[in-house]
Image: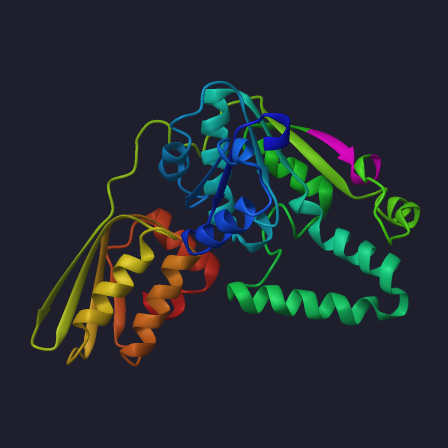
Amino acid sequence: MTSRGKHYFGLDLPIVINEMASAAAKVMTPGQADLAVYQGVDATNYESLRNALNSVDGEICIITEGLIPYFNDPELISMCSAVHRLLSEFGGCWITADHSVVGIYNETYHALYGENENVMLSLTKQSASNMADVKLCQNSMCANGHAAAEVFLNGQGFAVERHSISDYLPDLHGVDTDKLRDAYRSMETWIMTVNSVNHNSSDSKDNKPFSVRIEIENEKMTVILIGRLDTITAPKLLEKFERLKEGVTTCTVNAKDLEYISSAGLRVMLMMYKALNGKLKMEQVNSAVKEILEVTGFEQFLL
């Protein structure tokens, strides 16, 4: 992108941004480096994404690569809402092939490894799942085929333009590219644009700023959460809990003003639950957060 004079915004989990930026700097010219910005974000959080794009002037092209398979449905819907809101504001499009990720791996390994494809595919899936501690491809864009994914995106307010990946595959050194092109005929990259209102959009209100307050009395901890517990904010909760947990035997999490909880937030809750030998419960949980707990199965032990 930068070699073509385009401004590039590398947005990823805060934990990997520093490595991403330093690696890219080694292969870019100073002029290219001036066009590249890297920032840690939560992709399900509109405010997080919008703050990263404060210097943008003009249309944007949002590309998600290898992101969507890690989401559960509530996270996917929240990300679609954020992307829809950004495209409504700036104009432009969203491009991804993430819905084809399983097929791409299947076809690639079949073309390159033949009878060993299942071994390679199994190793890849296991590695990715272990790294993120989630089950991959369990959401509405990845689990039920292209037709169902397109219906889902239409419902989120996007028009979908479908392109075969084989039409864009360049010649690759040391690889039988023609064989890969044949394999990729049914694999698709999609270009999405806004075509209607996203009824899940949070345009009508911004999220409350995140805060966590912890009170301890007679070995009982009370945690009061406000705002979104996500990739950006979950480490703040964990840090406070680890610092104050000594001598605590039970914990109640007041979720009255908790607006959203992502997989990162759920993992912190699970760590707290295990640290207290199961003596942790959430109370005053609103319907939006309760739905996430039910979808992920966490309601069985947190409520």
Q: Is residue 3 left or right of residue 87?
A: right
**Visible in this render: residue 75?**
yes
Q: How is the image coloured?
A: rainbow
- Which region shows up in magenta? 161-167
Residue 163 image offset from top left, x and y in percent: 77, 33
In the image, farthest residue toward the left: 217
Question: In the image, is residue 217 part of the stretch drawn in magenta?
Answer: no
Decide if residue 227 is on the left or right side of residue 51: left
What is the tally of numbered marks visible in this picture? 0
Q: Residue at x 23, y 67 (%)?
A: 241
Asked whether residue 1 is in view, the answer is no
Query: Nearest the camera: 248 or 131?
Result: 131
Residue 162 part of the magenta-drawn span: yes
Which quadrant holds the N terminus? Answer: top right
Q: Nearer the viewer, residue 178 or 77?
A: 178
- The answer to which of 75 and 155 lies nearer the viewer is 75
Q: Position of residue 291 (x, y in %)?
A: 41, 52
> The C terminus appears in which quarter of the rendering?
bottom left
Indicate the position of residue 184 as horizontal and vertical percent values: 83, 45
Quarter of the image for residue 171 reads top right
Up the image or down, 62 lies above or below 143; here it is above
Q: Is residue 267 above or below residue 81?
A: below
Q: Is residue 278 left or right of residue 250?
A: right
Question: Which residue is at 15% across, 81% downward?
Answer: 247
Q: Residue at x 29, y 38 (%)?
A: 207
The residue under the point 30% across, 49% down is: 286
